[in-house]
Amino acid sequence: MPDNYDDPRGGLATPRPGQEHFVAEVDEGGLGAVDAVKSDSAPSSFWRDAWREMRGRWLFWVSAAIILLVVLVAAFPGWFTSLDPRLDCELTESLGGPEPGHPFGFDKQGCDIYTRTIYGARASVLVGIMSTTMVVLVGAVMGSIAGYYGKWFDTILSRVTDIFFAIPLVLAAIVIMSVTPNRTAFIVALVLALFGWPQIARITRGTVMSVKNNEFVTAARSLGMSRGRILRRHVLPNASAPIIVYATVALGQFIVAEASLSFLGIGLPPSVVSWGGDINQYQQAIRTAPEIILYPAGGLALTVLGFMMMGDVVRDALDPKARKR
Amino acid sequence: MTTQFPVTNAGTGDDGLAPVDPSKPLLEIKDLEISFTTAVGTVNAVRGANITVYPGQSVAIVGESGSGKSTTAAAIIDLLPGTGKVTGGSIVFDGRELVGAPAAENEALRGREIGMVPQDPMSNLNPVWRIGTQVTEALKANGFKGSKAELNERIAAVLNEAGLPDAERRAKQYPHEFSGGMRQRALIGIGLASRPKLLIADEPTSALDVTVQRQILDHLGTMTQDLGTAVLFITHDLGLAAERAEHLVVMFKGRVVESGPAQQILADPQHPYTKRLVAAAPSLASRRIQVAHEGGQAPTELVHRAEGGQTGDVVVARNLTKVFDIRGSLFGGSTEFKAVDDVSFRLGRGKTLALVGESGSGKSTAANMVLGLLEPTSGAVEFDGVDIAGLSPQEAFRFRRRIQPVFQNPYGSLDPMFSIFRSIEEPLELHREGSRKQREKRVRELLDMVSLPASAMRRFPNELSGGQRQRIAIARALALNPEVVVLDEAVSALDVLVQAQILELLGKLQDELGLSYLFITHDLAVVRQIADDVVVMQTGKVVEQATTDEVFDNPQQQYTRDLLAAIPGAGLEGVELAG
């Protein structure tokens, strides 16, 4: 071993082969300024990035199309059928098969199934949207107060949500609905929301707690900003992504819950056309005309699928960590 | 204990003499090309890199984040993340070509012949397993076959070597019972357990305190020397690299821009990038004049103008103490923890006071009390002669605009939902400064002050680099014309060049605006560049307090001396540096 290999601290008279002093040529572009701002790309924000991510996925467009269709049907059933779901019924047509102008055939009462399926959308969408709105309002307010201010309110809220978690949503709704005399879409939504809000309160509480530890919150505090204003301006917007994701999924769940209640006969009264009620009605004819139950059930499935898929797409766009690879 | 360690790699005894030909390279990387496929196309992460490592030698790859240094290391052990692929060149290890070799063959190399010490000791040990189990796993994966007794003996030996005395008891402990330094020791032990010929240490100590860093590196040095293991350091710290390696490889934007003997590169850098790096490295330039005093004028003179002749101390902390209750056992008992213990200091107007300490020294807690974000358990903070604890809400609101913070984490200190314009405008809006038009003018002015183009206004934080975000945070802090800026580790997370740039900016702003800085840091090297006075803290107490020159030239306390000695590159005093 030559002597000069012994010194571990450099100081070599001659570097070993392959370790001679090497200097690269300066790159064509030069070094560039240290840490220059890239100005060639378009400005982007969290929401803009999320939108870019979403619009590149076919699932988004499919679910958006389904949701748009369902909402249009619910809002303007008259655009899709000229018949009335309850009045234009001929008992002579009872359980009659499809014929021109009546693509799905007739139910036991001789009513047009296509028309009833169209009109059934309104109850589902209405209950879904109303209960989701209530759940988000109550849950987000409760959750953010508990997560942001903490202390006794947090303790109480946590225990209350624990209790609510122990009660299955549909079971609780059955009990309440069975003693409710005046059953309207609003009442059904209210009952569902009553037992649905703790979930979203929990989610909000968790995200608010993690967001409030960020340094931009401390920076806002040291500007002298009030706590309420920090919560509204900085914490909630940054905590909104999981709330939006959950709300989209919850909408589908509430629609299913409403249908379950109506199917059991304790949701919307029979005077209101609803998919759940119709499924219940048509199952009585399942031996003679098994196919007719598929129309309201299909409408229900399509609607829930639409919202659930949208929930998936929104989650992937808003929470890149959860994105499947 | 003659052949007690049945190491599979026959010939590499534990007597430390590697039987490899020392004149033949152990690792030879030639024209290495690595690219990643991303949504925007192919990114060439490494372009034509050449690196040679001889047996038993220590080599360091130096570069900033994104330079391709870690990617190169990952390619050696065939663990490129994500879509990364070697697209050209060759990696020859001990006479074998690794590029294109079957995965099983490369797998067999890992651990047995090429060991790895990862960057973050906190996340690289599995928290649910005992340390001993994790050592066993490493040994078994690398072909250890022996009886239970032999295994236990081997585990104890591994931990002992790694500098963890009382190894038998240590092996039964869980990672959370270890400090960061102990975990890194365990990981080094695991990395060297199978007597590899090459150890890749990827930023092995950047997550640790400086004094711990020094111990770990010293230990790693002696251990690898005893075993004859070659070490490939991956680091962003030029001082550390020069101190620990004989051969340096400087990487920039995926290319090796300069390589050669460490001393030669430091003393006489040739490539413009290396020159820049050497000039900016605070640890190496620690004998430079303070930035604030450059230009030959003491900042106080300028302050006289700015503040109408006001001098004296703008912030006075008197006997500050902060006690936290720590939730104790299951039964709700709590113990007291004194984070800050009787700390007093004075920040002169237009001056910079550095609070220096390692993690857990209470420096940030003290800063938060100065900012009025935490209430002291006892003691007081006086701002401009007024105790801030006694302020009415309105007075407190007015006090806020006179003292503003800049935090460490450039990723957490700006609201990601706010555009840069809104972020900087927010303080003005909150304190009802001017009309919307005037505010916009002020935002432009501030951006100009921190040397960012006005076009940055429309951008969002995620589009900016760490250094740029830190500039925005500074602009935001300056929006209300504060007198004091609290810089809490404000440059610690930045690459060296960017760090130097921000320090220069801070110095310039201090000169222009007569600002006073309370500079919280763990990095003494930076202190020399910016501070007038230094307060050294350890476990909540003030250890030493003096002017910067005194602390550096004539430290009174052992702890301060330890801190100074631990600065990477501090031992290189003798080397003539190129400016």
Image (tube, coloured by chain):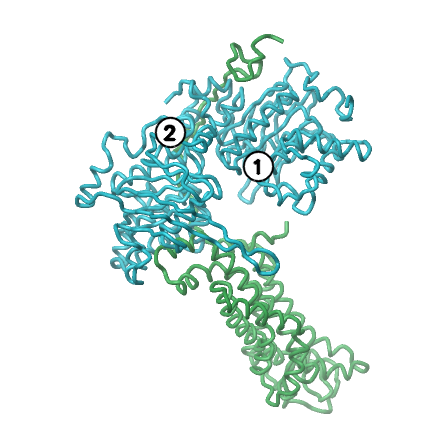
Which residue is the site of mark 2?
B552
Q: Quadrant of residue B513?
A: top left
| Residue at 48% across, 63% down | A148
Mark before the other along the chain sequence, 2 or 1: 1
Which residue is the site of mark 1?
B181
On screen, B23 above or below B214? Answer: above
On screen, B496 above or below B348? Answer: above
On screen, A167 above or below B269? Answer: below
The image shows residue B411 at horizontal and vertical percentages of 46, 47
Looking at the rendered structure, the secondary structure element under dot 1 is: helix
- Chain B tint in image: cyan
Determine the CA span between mark 2 and mark 1: 26 Å
| Residue at 27% across, 51% down | B441
Which numbered marker is on residue B62? Answer: none
Looking at the rendered structure, the secondary structure element under dot 2 is: helix
| Residue at 65% across, 20% down | B228
The image shows residue B197 at horizontal and vertical percentages of 67, 23
Q: Nearer the viewer, residue B176 or B302?
A: B176
The three-letter amino acid code for the residue at tag 1 is Gly
On screen, A320 above or below B534? Answer: below
- Colour-to-chain, green: A
